[in-house]
Amino acid sequence: MSPVLLSLLGGLGPQLLLLLLRPPAASGDCSLPPDVPNAQATLESLTSFAEGRRVTYKCNKGFVKVPGKADSVVCQNNKWSELAEFCNRSCDFPARLRFASLKKSYTHQNYFPEGSTVEYECRAGYIRDPSLSGNITCLQNFMWSKPDEFCKKRSCPKPREIENGHVNITTDILLGANIYFSCNAGYKLVGAASSFCGSMGNTVGWTDEFPECQGKTEKF
């Protein structure tokens, strides 16, 4: 402290001198947190925030938090910490497809910015058509591109003949199809009247054993 300043302070009364030399009160309060693009702060009706108080932001409707970016500020020395923009537009979670499921690497993701690509794999009972793409892309309008039907139904084995009876194929023998059994006149059907082409692990097969047409019934 300079001699001139000491001389000036020496002319002051002791109480006034103590008041001037005392450090300013450290309230530590911050006012309202800063605006962040495409996000709203969770204020809980507060207008003043104590030292160390953290305020978290939530993205506006239609926007999603960018993974890895901070979403809160802290009151430090009467100022809020810096916070970069962290909300961006995103496509919705990809749609469920009847013939395919999203690969596991994408199932826990919720941020799909424009240009993002995701890949599907065939469900059980379907086989991949290599000539068609299994990907979809988040377009500029934040809608997914229309997927090709890149997985085709597997075919069950051709039904064997039934002695003294018939196998009736109404449509085809692909996954989901039903076939029906009947016996010639004078024979009785023993077993299932139909069978369903269903998924069996990595392949498909008939879910019910084929019946038999047994013995001629007594004629009246």
Image (cartoon, rainbow, N blue to C red):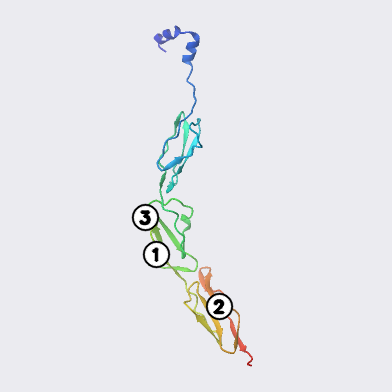
Residue at (49% x, 17% y) in the render = 22
Q: Which residue is mark 2?
A: 194
* 195 sits to left or right of 3: right
* 179 sits to left or right of 147: right
Q: Amino acid at mark 3?
A: Leu
Q: Nearer the viewer, residue 143 or 204?
A: 143
Mark 3 secondary-structure assignment = loop
| Mark 3 touches mark 1? (CB < 8 Å) | no
Q: Nearer the viewer, residue 124 or 148?
A: 148
Give the image location of residue 98, x and y in percent.
Answer: 47, 64
| Mark 3 touches mark 2? (CB < 8 Å) | no
Q: Which residue is mark 1?
A: 148
Q: Which residue is mark 3?
A: 139
Residue at (57% x, 89% y) in the render = 185
Q: How far separated are the C-alphas under marks 3 and 2?
A: 46 Å
Q: How far separated are the C-alphas under marks 3 and 1?
A: 16 Å
Mark 2 secondary-structure assignment = strand
Q: Nearer the viewer, residue 19 or 1?
A: 19
Q: Earlier in the sequence, mark 3 or mark 1?
A: 3
Q: Earlier in the sequence, mark 1 or mark 2?
A: 1
